[in-house]
Each structure stands twice: as structure tokens, then as C-alpha cells.
Amino acid sequence: MNPYIERVLNETRAKNPNEPEFLQTVEEVLTSLEPVINAHPEYEKVSLLERMVEPERIIQFRVVWEDDNHNWQVNKGYRVQYNAALGPYKGGIRFDPSVNLSIIKFLGFEQTFKDALTGLPIGGGKGGSDFDPRGKSEAEVMRFCQAFTSELYRHIGQDIDCPAGDLGCGSREITYMYGQYRRLVGAAEFGALSGKFVSSGGSLGRSEATGYGAVYYLEEVLKHDGLDIKGKKLAIAGFGNVAWGIMKKATELGAKVTYFSGPDGYIHDPDGVCTPEKLDFIVEMRAKDSAHCAPYAEKFGCEFVPNQKCWGVKDVDVYMPSATQNDVNLEWAKKIADSGVKYYIEVANMPTTNDALQFLKEQKHMVVAPSKAVNAGGVSVSELEMAQNAERVYWTAEEVDAKLHDIMKNIYHSSVAAAERYGLGYDLVAGANIVGFQRVADAMMVQGVF
Ligand code: 2IT
């Protein structure tokens, strides 16, 4: 390994011993940059990698809110402002009991390269809280979002840091946060938060964007092999907003999602989740209870396999893990490789453990695509939302979709070209890391050392 990369990895491990998710993403990204670092000895002279792995700023705060029984609840709040070399910090807010600093730092590091990969003027950041939105009333969600924003507002702004949603934080939560932000700053500064409801400064197409973008990316991957997406069967994980977008776009293009899953097990629907009734049911089921997808099987009379993942099923063309991090470990990866399915398209942030990812990449019969490229449609349309807010205009759904489509094609083709340029062949994972890294590096190299 390049000695500079090795040294930075060792230092990062020593400095952040209790942050496994963060170390996992740093190892994944840095090891794939070897040819770039070999070609640029000047980076070490200005400690570029050391500066990149250290967030520019970490904000941690107390969130106090009143539940419906008039008890005061206290949660942790986080915002990691990772890197603003390319533009205001941009990235989602995650509300989940699993949230801790390691998870927010991993997401922020990934986000920095993802946002760079879009080619849009946005830096990387991420935030969240260990607040559990499950089972909370509407009023509790609103009071929590207001309390969270009462601290966060002083750190964000349309030219400073522009949070959006992530797991457990959708348009409802973001729009409550926007309402509180507007109240506190006394200005209609829509661009400070993205993913808002369309009735309140949001962009058409934002809720579909991550799923649609993933399918546009998949189309390019298939085209590379001379294949059409029409008729293809997809196995995905998750049944949230991203999964729903994939289901909708796949249906529109003549493909179908025949497997999807929740924390309780997986569904096999050989006809595909492809009617408006089924798609609407997914949204309702998710809103009622994000932990169970079994009701879909009861409603539509198809198979539900409890406590299992659908990785390894053979009667599909593509796997798309779209739920959360580390869903696919080495054991699942072996089942995936054995199934003979060629396409492994990551969608969730870091859905694959590093050993599993390496193993899948080594399978000669497989094509592996990385989440930071595949799911970048979400943040791209968030940036388009900021652009509309700044211009005080609304674009049509068609205008937004056309831009999203172009951005996804660009992400794919620039990744392919970067890997080839460094002699790595058709390597979508390394290609995405290289493009993202190079854009952040180019900006940092000309902004001076700080
Ligand atoms: O992981 C992600 O890219 C997001 N959660 C969306 C970030 C954004 O700013 O829309």
C-alpha cells in the first residue's frame, strides 16, 4: 500500500478508536485512492488526507422536548460539518436510536465525496439525533423537530449548511424544522433546508429522486453490457422512500421489483410491486409502522418469509440493498455470489461491509456499483431545490427530472472514465471514489492550508 495512505489510516485508527463505522468508510475510500495518491506526491506535503479525514467542525447538542404525557425528554443532537471546499455543507439528518458520532461521521465523510461526485457546488455534512420517531404522535414529532432546530438554526443557513432528510426524517420533519428556522431567523430563507413539502418551498421530484436516480444509474450499467432495463427483475432491501422510488421508476421503464424486505423479513411478489394500489400501500404501510412489511403479503396474497433477507434468491437480475448500513456481510455476499446474479447495485449508504464489498468486487461474473454514486440523485435534487429557492422560482417536474437524469449519467460516465484513466479497468467503486476525491482535492489545493 502507498505509505502515505497507510500512515494516515493508522493515525486515523489511533485517533478514533471507538468509531467503527467511521473507520470502515475511511478505509474503504482511502485504499481505493492508491493510484491517485501515487500520482500526486504534493498532497502529502500539505497533509491533504489528514485534513480530509478530520471534519471541519462537529457540533453536538442537547435536545429537550415535552412528550404527550408532559414528561421532559432529552436526546442527543449532532451536526458534523465535514468539508465545505466545494460549497455549503449539505447532507441529511438521521433520526434513529442507533445514531451516534461514529455513524454521523461515517455518513458525513461519504457525503463529502458523494456531493462532489454530483458535480454541483455543495460540500459535505451530516446530522441527526438518537430520537426514535417510531410510535410518536404528530404533536411529539413537531415539538421534537422544533426543539432540535432551536439549537441547530444558529449553525445552518442557505450559504452555510443546508440539511435535508435521511432515515427517520422526511418532508414532514424537514418542513417542521424549516418552520422553526423561519420563526427564529425572521426570514423566508427556504434554501437553508431541503426536502421540504412542495407546498412550502420544496422541489417537485425530491421525494422520488433517490430511487429514480438509482434506476437511471442502473440503466447505464445495463447499457454498458448491451442490455435494456425492460423486463429486468429487481430484489431490493427496504420499503422506505428510496425503495418506493425504485419501485415506481422500475415499473415505468418496464422492469419490476419482485422482492423487497423490512426488519421483519422479506416479501416475494412475482408480479412485481407495480400497480398504483401496491405503490400506495407501501407508502401507507411505512407511515403506520416502519418495522413491518408483512402486511403487504396479507393484503396482496403473496409470500412473506419472516426474519430473512432476500440476498441469494436466484430468480432476479439485480440486487439493490436500499435499507441501511452493513446489511450485507461476508456471509450474505457469498450467497449473493453463488446465486449467479450479476448486478450488485448498492443504494443505502455503506450497505456492504468492507470484506463483503472486496469479495463481491473480486467475483469475475459480477458488476458492483457503489452507493455514493447510485444514491446521489437524492442530494442532487436537494441542490436543485436550493437553486430554485435562491432564484425564487419553481421548476416543473419534467425540468427537475431531466436534470436528475443528466446528473446520474454524468456520475456513471465520469466514474468509468476515472477508473480507466488510472488503469483500473471497469471499476465503478474506485471510479466514484476517485472522481469525488479529485474534486474535493482540487478545491482544497487552491484554497490554502487550514
Ligand atoms: O444520504 C443522502 O445523500 C441524503 N440523506 C440526502 C442528503 C440531501 O442533502 O438531500
Image (spheres, rainbow, N blue to C red):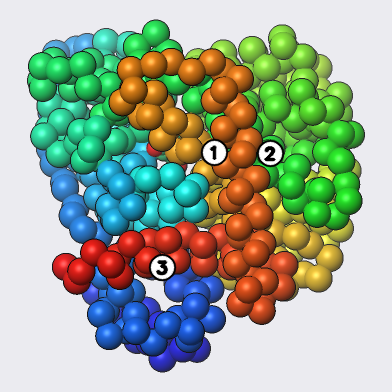
Does 299 sit above or below residue 387?
above
Residue 123 appears in the picture as rendered:
yes
Q: How many marks?
A: 3
Q: Which residue is mark 2?
A: 216
Quadrant of picture, ligand 1: top left
Query: For this view, does 278 lie left or right of residue 57?
Result: right
Q: Give the alpha-carbon distance from disc 1 to disc 3, as whole Å.
A: 22 Å
Q: Pick whichever of labels 2 and 3 is earlier in the sequence.
A: 3
Amino acid at pointer 1: Gly
Q: Which mark is residue 71?
A: none
Query: What residue is shown at x 24% (from left), y 50% (from top)?
Result: 81
Please rate how many residues cluster around mark 2, counting C-alpha atoms within 10 Å: few if below 14, some from 14 to 19, many from 20.
Answer: many
Please rate how many residues cluster around mark 1, counting C-alpha atoms within 10 Å: few if below 14, some from 14 to 19, many from 20.
Answer: many
Picture coordinates of residue 352 (x, y %)? 58, 57
Does 101 sit above or below residue 130?
below
Q: Which residue is mark 3?
A: 26
Picture coordinates of residue 263 (x, y %)? 57, 36
Q: Pick whichever of labels 1 and 2 is earlier in the sequence.
A: 2
Picture coordinates of residue 264 (x, y %)? 60, 34
* Residue 391 occupies quadrant: top left
Task: Identify the secondary structure beneath mark 2.
Answer: helix
Amino acid at pointer 2: Tyr
| Label 1–label 2 contact, CB within 8 A | yes
* Residue placed most toward the observer, 319 or 87: 87
Amino acid at pointer 3: Val
Task: Identify the secondary structure beneath mark 3.
Answer: helix
Q: Pick whichever of labels 1 and 3 is earlier in the sequence.
A: 3
Q: Which mark is residue 377?
A: 1
